[in-house]
Image (cartoon, rainbow, N blue to C red):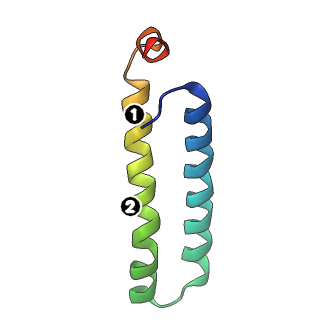
Amino acid sequence: MISNDKELSVTLERIRHLQDQLALLRKTETNFVNYRLSSGGFIAEIDRMQLDVREYLSTPATKTQAG
């Protein structure tokens, strides 16, 4: 769970890095089945982190700074 703006920034950087890795995998993996198997972990982690970002951003800054 993201608790401050620094963690938000780091999480957004990690999401971007995983997206870049996934884009590279998409370009280099020619076998559809292998791609689906390899990409699943990346996609699941991106989804999890994006959910954390949405939860953090849906809370007013005053509440996150206090707690």
Q: Is residue 5 above or below residue 32?
A: above
**How many other residues sit within 10 Å of disc 2, few (<14), some (14-19) or many (≥20)?**
few
Q: Which residue is mark 1?
A: 54
Q: Amino acid at mark 2?
A: Ala
Q: Residue at x 54, y 75 (%)?
A: 26
Q: Is residue 38 above or below residue 47?
A: below
Secondary structure, mark 1, is helix
Determine the residue located farthest toward the front in the rendered image. 67
Asked where in the image residue 22 lies, by quadrant, the reply is bottom right
Q: Residue at x 62, y 61 (%)?
A: 20
Relative placement, left or right, of 23 versus 46 is right
**How many other residues sit within 10 Å of disc 1, few (<14), some (14-19) or many (≥20)?**
few
Q: Residue at x 42, y 86 (%)?
A: 32
Q: Amino acid at mark 1?
A: Arg
Whole-angstrom CA distance, mark 1 to mark 2, is 15 Å
In the picture, the quarter occupied by the C terminus is top left
Determine the residue located farthest toward the top in the rendered image. 62
Q: Residue at x 53, y 89 (%)?
A: 30
Q: Nearer the viewer, residue 34 or 66?
A: 66
Q: Earlier in the sequence, mark 1 or mark 2?
A: 2
Relative placement, left or right, of 7 versus 50 is right
Find residue 35 and name its label. none
Secondary structure, mark 2, is helix
Residue 1 at x, y = what percent? 42, 38
Number of disc labels:
2
Find residue 44 and name its label. 2
Q: Is residue 9 above or below residue 50?
A: above
